[in-house]
Amino acid sequence: PAPSPSPTPSNGGGSGSYSGDITYYAVGLGSCGWDDAGLDKTDNIVAISSALYADLGNGICGKKLSITANGKTITGTVRDKCPSCAKGSIDVSEKAFLDLFGDVGVGRSKVTWSFA
C-alpha cells in the first residue's frame, strides 16, 4: 500500500487537523494506563501513532478527537498509542470503526481527524 500522508502541521498542544489511515484493534491495557478490555463494542477508543504520541506527550491521554471517514463524523477518546501506525493514522475500537463504516470487513480506510 501507498504510504500514509503526513499530518497537516498543527499549532502545537494537540491542535490541528490530521489525515492518514484508520484501522481497528482489540482494546485492552493501553499506553495511557487504562484497562479497556471488554469495551471494544461499547466505547469509541482511539490509539494514535507512537510518533505523534511521542511529539505530544502523555498529556494527550483522555483527549477527545473528532474523526471523519466515509461521510460520517464521530468522537473518540485517546487511550492508547499505535506502534505500527504512520504519523496521522489512528487505530480505533471496533465500535468506533463500525460507527463509521458499518462493517469491520473494510479493514483499512482513509480518515481525517482533529482534536475536539
Image (cartoon, grey):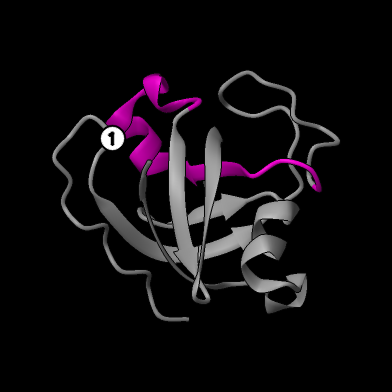
**Looking at the image, residue 70 lies above or below residue 77:** below
Q: Which residues fall within the magenta stretch?
A: 41-62
- Residue 46: x and y in percent read 57, 43
The answer to which image quadrant residue 15 occupies is top left
- Quickly name the residue at label 1: 14
Identify which residue is drawn at 38% across, 20% down.
Answer: 59
Mark 1 belongs to which amino acid? Answer: Gly
Nearest the camera: 49 or 63? 63
Image position of 95 (left or right of 45): right
Front residue of 33/83: it is 33
Q: Residue 27: give x, y in percent of width and height.
A: 73, 40
Residue at 75 percent of width and 33 percent of height? 28
| Vertical order, 29 against 100 (above or below) | above
Q: Position of residue 88 (x, y in %)?
A: 36, 55
**Viewport quadrant of the C terminus:** top left
Specify the quadrant of the image occupied by residue 86: bottom left
